[in-house]
Each structure stands twice: as C-alpha cells, then as structure tokens.
C-alpha cells in the first residue's frame, strides 16, 4: 500500500488528493494546487486581462475628452458665427 506524502506545513503523512490537481492535508488543512500548467496559464491570463482593462479605460477616457473639447469648441464657434450674422444685419431690417 502507498503511504501518503508528508505535509510541508505540519510534517504529518496525511496528504490526500481532493481533485486531479489539488492536494490537502487532513491534519492541518494545508492545500495546494499542483497543476503548474493550469496555474501558470491562469496567472498570465489574469495579468493580461488586467493590463488590457486599464489600457481600454485610458483609451476610452481620451476619446471622451477629445469629443468633449470638440463639442465645446463647435458651440463657441457657432455662437460667434451667430453674433457676427446678427451684427451684420442693419437694425432697420429687423
């Protein structure tokens, strides 16, 4: 019969396999995922998504800022154009 591996935390031989990649100590509750490929892939994927999320937020904020400036500038320009037209019309014609 195969004996259980030694727990790195408590030193007892009470490690049991919970799932295909997770092992847990029945004595102290220590648990570890031993699937290096799975944990490495998830770690890289989470970091990529986090960086991509911040980049997207900054791009969206930049686009929003440009649109706001353009709208404000066009409103000022339109108001100035209206004032010029009104001042160009003689009071007699009104």
Image (cartoon, helix red, strand yellow):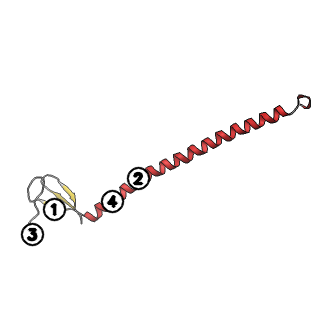
Q: Residues within 10 Å of mark 2 (few under 14, many from 20)?
A: few
Q: Which residue is mark 2?
A: 51
Task: Judge whether 91 appears above or below 16 on screen.
Answer: above
Q: Residue at x 78, y 36 (%)?
A: 82
Q: Which residue is the extreme one toward the top? A: 91
Element at label 3: loop
In depth, the one of 75 and 25 nearer the eye is 75
Query: Separation of disc 2 and disc 4 at Cα?
Result: 14 Å
Query: Separation of disc 1 and disc 4 at Cα?
Result: 24 Å
Q: Are marks 2 and 1 in contact (CB under 8 Å)?
A: no
Q: Are marks 3 and 1 in contact (CB under 8 Å)?
A: no
Element at label 4: helix
Q: Residue at x 74, y 35 (%)?
A: 80
Q: Residue at x 9, y 60 (%)?
A: 13
Earlier residue among tags 3 and 1:
3
Earlier residue among tags 2 and 4:
4
Query: Separation of disc 3 and disc 1 at Cα?
Result: 12 Å
Element at label 2: helix
Q: Which residue is mark 1?
A: 16
Q: Which residue is mark 3?
A: 2
Q: Which residue is mark 4?
A: 42
């Amino acid at each position: 019969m195969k004996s259980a591996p030694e727990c790195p935390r408590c030193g007892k031989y009470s490690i049991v396999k919970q799932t295909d990649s997770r092992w847990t100590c029945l004595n102290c509750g220590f648990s570890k995922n031993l699937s290096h490929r799975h944990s490495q892939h998830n770690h890289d994927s989470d970091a990529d998504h986090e960086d991509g999320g911040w980049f997207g937020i900054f791009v969206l904020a930049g686009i929003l800022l440009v649109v706001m400036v353009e709208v404000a500038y066009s409103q000022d320009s339109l108001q100035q154009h209206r004032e010029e037209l009104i001042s160009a019309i003689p009071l007699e014609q009104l």
